[in-house]
Amino acid sequence: MIPGLLEKLGQWFSRSWMFMCFFAGFFLFWEYSIGWFDVPRYILPRPTEIITKSAADIDRLLYYTWVTGSESFTGYIIAIVIAVPLGLAIAFSSILRRTIYPFFVSVEMVPKIAFAPLFISWLGFGFLPKIIIVFLVCFFPIVLNAILAFSSLSEELTRFCSATGATRTRAFLKVRLPAALPQCFVGFKYGAINATVGATIAEFIGSDQGLGFYIQIVTGNMRPDLAFAAIFMLTALGLFLFGLVTLAERLLVPWHISQRRNK
Amino acid sequence: MTAAVDIQSVTKVFNEGAAAVAAFGPGDLRVEAGEFVSLLGPSGCGKSTLLLMVAGLLESSSGAITVKGRRVSGPRTDIGIMFQDSTLVPWRTVRGNIELQLELRNLDVRGYEDRIRSLLQQVNLEDFAASAPYELSGGMRQRAAFCQALVHDPDTLLLDEPLGKLDAMTRESIRRDLQNLWLDKKQTVLLVTHSIEEAVQLSNRVVVISPRPGRIEKILEIDLPWPRDLATKNSSRFSEYVMEIQLIFQRYGVI
């Protein structure tokens, strides 16, 4: 087991060492250029300062990460749960395709974030308006990709299914659904990226907790070090969510061209 | 005796009014049980359209088609079809893809284990049953697709240019496999192809179809001994058949 693990680590390292060097170089440049260019620390702190200074406030940072994280996650999951069946219905119903579908396509052009102040004024500072805003920014990419996924089975496979006399349910479960998964995941990934953006902006507009709220407060207090600490937390949150989706994709669609590993 | 496939004054027109495009016909053709018949013509001549109409996957504009004495009025499930593009799905192995045909038909896969094994053996894929389609070469994929189309043991086979996208050498070797599969079971086969050689080598009869709109120009009886191997293809009678068909297409300016 240990040699296997070491081998895997080795493979991982050989794939990503260039990226890691670049990443380290970026932070080293940041750390030292602050001194070279004499940047005041109330404008831009050093990475090491961000870490040491924010350690004092770690409890609040962690709690707010939890708050923003649960807003993002809840809104995102609700978006998936509603968007996928709806996308399926639109793909199969000619009436919905001619009514709701063009409506969704036009709403996709509206910056959903513009609704955020309205929701806050209607529903207050609590959890609910945040979830609705996260839902809005996640829902459209997921539903549009789901419609595309369920309506783009190749002509050959469609004919193949009819030639076998398979019932609609059977053809759906055995052919249509698995064939649609890769395109569905395109939407899930867009949604995962949008989720933390939606939650943060919702918190900017009206909130008494969460990382978005925190960034506004500490920036007002001339503490960019703490703002950066919150941004790092948000980045970690986004990566975590995106990582979950990628993991699910690897488990559910290991056969897709983007997931294949050279054997 | 009723014909295996009977095509009577069938036409196909796509679109209506001013935009109407005559794709095929009118055409008549009678295929007897156990016969291997090729529909040969240049691309766009409506031969694939005719095949889809026989399968009941496309409605004819006029005329009637019967398969095994029953009028075709919707997708026929009692036949085997191979389409131009592969119907192998990437999320299943070669064996899984063959089983997909059975599962979609609600047949018990366990009852077909021997059948699947012998089909894979016949096309030299027995060592690749557990491979994914994308791990195979184009020729191997097409062989797997044959097994998928044949596994439920249909007595009528409709093949739509199954070898169209393969290189010349692979095509040669799969033609041999196809011939052996047919000689073994003597299904009724309708093969759509644009290769004159392929049609002459594999068929009892070659139906030559003229370009746009497709009409049955001539039906040639190919009187050559079976199995038809490379020696047959080098014979002068084989060349005569090929020449005769080439002259027809030359008249149409196709070649």
Image (cartoon, grey):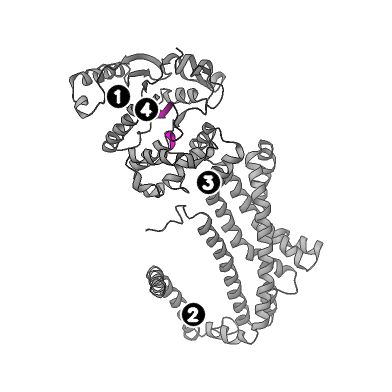
- Residue matched to label 3: A179
A163 vs A16: above or below: above
Secondary structure under tag 4 reads helix
What distance separates the C-alpha of mark 4 from that of mark 1? 24 Å
Image spot of residue A242 (x, y percent): 56, 64
Q: Please give the label number shown on residue B185.
A: 4
Image spot of residue A44 (x, y percent): 56, 81
Q: Which amino acid does label 1 sit on?
A: Ile
Q: What residue type is labelled 2?
A: Trp
Q: Which residue is drawn at 56% across and 54% down?
A: A185
Q: Do labels 3 and 2 share a chain?
A: yes
The residue marked by circle 3 belongs to what chain?
A: A
Q: What residue type is labelled 4?
A: Lys
- Say whether residue B85 is visible: yes
- Residue matched to label 2: A30
What distance separates the C-alpha of mark 4 from that of mark 3? 34 Å
- Callout in the foreground (4, 3): 4
A31 vs B188: above or below: below
- Callout in the foreground (4, 2): 4
Q: Which residue is drawn at 50% across and 19% down?
A: B12
What distance separates the C-alpha of mark 4 from that of mark 2? 75 Å
Q: Which residue is drawn at 60% across and 37% down?
A: A168
The N terminus of chain B, quarter of image: top left
A64 vs B217: above or below: below
Who comes first in sequence, dot 4 or dot 1? 4
